[in-house]
Image (cartoon, rainbow, N blue to C red):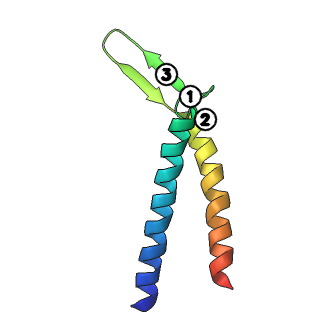
C-alpha cells in the first residue's frame, strides 16, 4: 500500500504542475486552443471545434515529461 500512496501523491503533483502550466500559459498569452491547424467550422445551427494542433503539441510535451519521470523513478 505504501507504493500505491506514493503513486497517488506523484500523480497529484503532476496534475498540479499541469494546471499551473495551463494557468501560466494563459497569463503569458500562449494561444493554446487557437493554434494554426486547429479546426473550427461555424454553421447556421452550430459550431464544431477540434484543436488538432493543440492536441498534438500537448501529446508531445506530455510524452517527453512522462518519459523523464518514469526514467527518474526506475533507478
Q: Is residue 59 above or below residue 27?
A: below
**Looking at the picture, how far across and down is residue 43, in whole percent?**
39, 11
What's the residue at 51%, 58% (across, down)?
A: 17
Q: For the residues marked 2 and 1, what is the alpha-carbon distance in whole angstroms? A: 5 Å
- Residue at numbered disc 3: 40
Against 5, residue 17 (above or below) is above
What x and y, as percent, mark residue 35? Answer: 60, 28
Gap in angstroms between the C-alphas marked 2 and 3: 12 Å
Residue 58 spot, x, y in % from top left: 59, 47
Which residue matches tag 1? Answer: 38
Q: Residue drawn 56% across and 28% down?
A: 38
Label 2 with label 1: CB-CB less than 8 Å: yes
Residue on which the image places disc 2? 53
Task: Give the spatial CA distance, label 1 vs label 3.
Answer: 7 Å
Q: Are marks 2 and 3 in contact (CB under 8 Å)?
A: no
Q: Secondary structure at mark 1?
A: loop
- Element type at mark 3: strand
All told, the count of numbered labels is 3
Q: Quadrant of the C terminus?
A: bottom right
Q: Is residue 33 above or below residue 75?
A: above
Is residue 4 found left or right of 30 in the rendered image?
Answer: left
Q: Residue at x 46, y 82 (%)?
A: 6
Badge 3: residue crowd in 10 Å (few <14, some 14–19, many ≥20): few
Circles 1 and 3: CB atoms closer than 8 Å: yes
User: Which of pointers 2 and 3 lies earlier in the amino acid sequence?
Assistant: 3
Amino acid at each position: 500500500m505504501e507504493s500505491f500512496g506514493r503513486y497517488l501523491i506523484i500523480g497529484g503533483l503532476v496534475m498540479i504542475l499541469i494546471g499551473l502550466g495551463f494557468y501560466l500559459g494563459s497569463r503569458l498569452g500562449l494561444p493554446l486552443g487557437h493554434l494554426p491547424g486547429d479546426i473550427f467550422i461555424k454553421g447556421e445551427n452550430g459550431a464544431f471545434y477540434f484543436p488538432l494542433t493543440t492536441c498534438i503539441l500537448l501529446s508531445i510535451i506530455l510524452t517527453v515529461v512522462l518519459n523523464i519521470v518514469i526514467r527518474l523513478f526506475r533507478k
